[in-house]
Amino acid sequence: MTDRPVLQMAAPRRGKPPQHFADLNHDERAALMREHGLPSFRAKQLANHYYAHLTVDPDDMTDLPADAKGPLTEAVFPPLMKKVTQLEADGGATLKTLWALHDNVKVESVLMKYPERATLCVTSQAGCGMACPFCATGQMGLTRNLSAAEIIEQVRLAARAARDGDLGGDPVRLSNVVFMGMGEPLANYKAVIATVRALVAPAPEGFGLSTRHVTVSTVGLVPAIDKLAKEGIPVTLALSLHAPDDELRNELVPINTRWSVDEALDAARRYFDATGRRVSIEYALIREMNDHAHRADLLGKKLRARGDGWVHVNPIPLNPTPGSKWTASDPAVEEEFVRTLRAHGIPTTIRDTRGSDIDGACGQLAIKEA
Ligand code: SAH
């Protein structure tokens, strides 16, 4: 990988999206109502339509004054994204949607139905500046941050699709959201934490998800992990480790040159101490790259050295990106990796790979469109 993109920490300020109701906090919404000559309780009605009924259509809003609701909804709910394509997998239980944002930037989200839950994988940035060489989005570089409303709209539209039976069978309630789509969520902290607040706030101010059912996945931006730990919203933290030693992790997750394996693991342990939430370690198993028994052993030792019961490991077979020289580990090697970690007392479960036949690995669909 000689022509690997350089790390980009800040997004270029290109194509700022229009401001949307979901970008505003309580006071800003009240002020907006005043601007429209309306009492502030109208903000609560709008929030109820948006977060509880999942609608922005004035025809659904019978409790708003007939002459005001058209112009009002147009002003507060500007369209932020249009569906470009939608792909189905797993017999209709997985739906992957490619969206065009207002500036025609493409992002994707994936909705997955399981027997006990429905999970949405959301995008937090168009592209990504972290440059992990095995990740499709990592190859694109960073285009821009998404606004809070652009992330929240992915959730509203998915919750609506699930409710309306788009996943097949009975209506489904969206129960889980994972920040594992395109982008590094903690590099777009402000919009991501605003989204997290909207996810867990009870209706009508939010979608009312349980904090346990929200997962923020990161390459390991240590100061941002510490900041997240202090928000008082104990979401699940996933740390994309992919290697237990700095030499290899510098290559697989280039930000490691800034915050090392030990620093990232210490931050993950502090996150557990602050929130009581068991941290997930993500580990894409790449054949003869990071899948050696000695690496499983080192990982087990490093996790155990930081205590008991604070962490579990989620290995996932690599979903090879087009043109990549890397491929997934052999099943037997995968099994040994898991066995070794468990022998160290580390709970380990292979993550399922939904939708790999529809370019499920993050960024692959958007790359094809581009
Ligand atoms: N930037 C965040 C979240 C985005 S990706 C992060 O890195 O955690 C969510 C997870 O998918 C991460 O663990 C990422 O490393 C992993 N991933 C990316 N490309 C993959 C691929 N081709 N196969 C398997 N996992 C992949």
Image: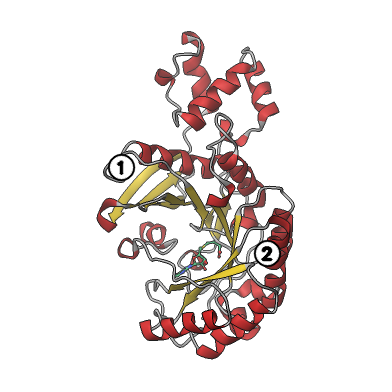
- Rendering coords of residue 363 (x, y %): 44, 61
Q: Amino acid at mark 2?
A: Leu
Question: Which quadrant is the C terminus positioned in?
Answer: bottom left
Q: Amino acid at mark 1?
A: Asp
CA–CA distance between discs 1 and 2? Answer: 36 Å
Q: Relative to residue 195, is residue 181 depicted above or below? A: below
Assign a secondary structure to mark 2: loop
| Label disc, if present, on residue 25 of the rendered structure | none
- At 43% from the left and 52% from the top, the residue drawn is 108
Front-lying residue, 186 or 196:
196
Circles 1 and 2: CB distance less than 8 Å?
no
Q: How many marks?
A: 2
Q: Which dot, 1 or 2, sits closer to the camera?
A: 1
Whichever of callouts 1 and 2 sits on the residue coming sooner in the sequence is 1
Count residues near mark 1 (Cα–Cα under 10 Å), then give few for <14, some for 14-19, many for 20+: some
Give the crowd class for mark 2: few <14, some 14-19, many >=20 residues within 10 Å.
many
Q: Is residue 257 left or right of residue 69?
A: right
Q: Nearer the viewer, residue 173 or 367?
A: 173
Relative vertical location of residue 241 with respect to residue 358 in this rendering, above or below: below
> Where is mark 2, residue-wise?
221
Image position, residue 203 (x, y; %): 55, 31
State the residue at coordinates (50%, 13%). Answer: 64
Report the colour scheme: secondary structure
Residue 298 falls in image quadrant: bottom right
Residue 166 numbered mark, or none: 1
Could you tell me if residue 325 is visible in this image? Answer: no
